[in-house]
Image (cartoon, grey):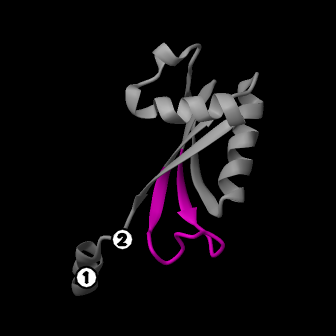
Amino acid sequence: MYQLNAHVLPTETSSQYGKIEGAYAVVFINYADIDGAYELARYYIESDGWQIDELEEEYLIFESPEDVEEDYLEFYNEALKDGYSLLFNCYERDEGIESENKENE
């Protein structure tokens, strides 16, 4: 089992489009090799309506549930059952920073 991390942006087909600025995705992929896991992660992220800004090169490998942090155990188990699991930690545009940047122009 692999855990991959990515920075993603919502596309017009995403349910989050217009609501959030972006997200940090945590992807659990239950696959035999890392190259295939990366391809599957890209596929599942894009199928869910997200554009990949960056897919990190570093990844984690889990051999058993005991290796997984408790907060992620639900997603690990889902990936065991379904082959993958996606978690999006969304963030909104910081209006204060945007206003501050306009003032400095």
| SS under mark 1 | helix
| For marks 2 and 1 on the same chain, the one whose residue lies earlier in the sequence | 2
Tell me if residue 10 is in the magenta stretch.
yes
Residue at position x 25%, y 82% from top?
Answer: 99
Please give left or right for residue 30 compared with residue 64 in the image: right
- Above or below: residue 25 compared with residue 76: below
Residue that appears at 71% across and 33% down: 37
Label ID, residue 38: none
Where is the N terminus found, in terms of image quarters?
top right
Where is mark 2, residue-wise? 93
Label 2 neighbourhood size at 10 Å, few (<14), some (14-19), many (20+)? few
Identify the residue under disc 1: 99
Q: Amino acid at mark 2?
A: Arg
The magenta region covers 6-24
Residue drawn at (65%, 64%) of the image: 49
Q: In terms of secondary structure, where does tag 2 sit? A: loop
